[in-house]
Amino acid sequence: MTVLTTILSIVGIITLLAIAYFFWRRHLHASRQREKQKMRFPPEQYMRHVGVFCPDYWIHTGSGICENKFAIPVANKQNPVCFDSGSTTRKTFNNLPEFPVKKGDERLKSRCDWIDNCGTSTGAKGLWSGISDLCGGM
């Protein structure tokens, strides 16, 4: 009887360890998923120092001036919202002194107008990571 008791005890301990391992892994996976959901893209530090100034793939040249140095196509080149007058590569945006800005903030208007009107093809929206999400309903 002692051999059978020992074998059953070992099987019981292994079963309990396997169950504990399963729940530990499940908890670990759930906590990683929560951490991923907390992460913002793009990060606020990037937005404060780079992303708030210009649309994606445009270059900030200072004083709110952005240049389309990579010749990203813009469908509405004649639209004054898309480029400064007399230019086909430059757009000046108003200054945003701080980031994050609340969704629908009036200071985003020039950026939101650009996103709505200056996509790569007719009807497409322009790309501006971190700003596009803030423009809803403007």
Image (cartoon, rainbow, N blue to C red):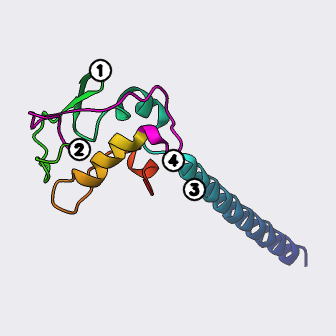
Identify the residue shown where x is 43% and y is 51%: 133
Residue highlighted by disc 1: 63
**Magenta part of the chain:** 82-107
The kind of secondary structure element at disc 4 is loop
Label ID, residue 103: 4
Query: Residue 29: which quarter of the image?
Result: bottom right
Asked whether the beta carbons under mark 4 and mark 1 sit within 8 Å of each other, the answer is no
| Kind of residue at badge 4 | Lys
User: In the picture shown, does residue 127 fall above or below 70?
Assistant: below
Q: Quadrant of the N terminus?
A: bottom right
Q: Residue at x 10, y 40 (%)?
A: 71
Q: Is residue 89 above or below residue 9?
A: above
Q: Which of pointers 2 and 3 indicates the residue nearer the eye?
A: 2
Q: Which mark is residue 81?
A: 2
Q: Which residue is mark 3?
A: 33
* Sequence-wise first label, 3 or 4: 3
The outermost residue toward the right is 1
Residue 34 is situated, as x and y percent measured from the top left of the image, at 61, 54
Amino acid type shown at disc 1: Ser
> Which residue is depicted at the point 51% across and 47% down?
103
* Residues under numbered marks 2 and 3 in contact, where contact means CB atoms less than 8 Å apart: no
Q: Earlier in the sequence, mark 4 or mark 2?
A: 2
Label the magenta part by its dominant secondary structure: loop
Sequence-wise, the earlier of marks 4 and 1 is: 1
Q: Residues within 10 Å of mark 4 (few under 14, many from 20)?
A: some
Q: Mark 2 falls on what kind of element? A: loop
Q: Position of residue 115 (x, y in %)?
A: 30, 49
Label 1 and label 3: CA atoms lie apart by: 40 Å
At label 2, the amino acid type is: Val
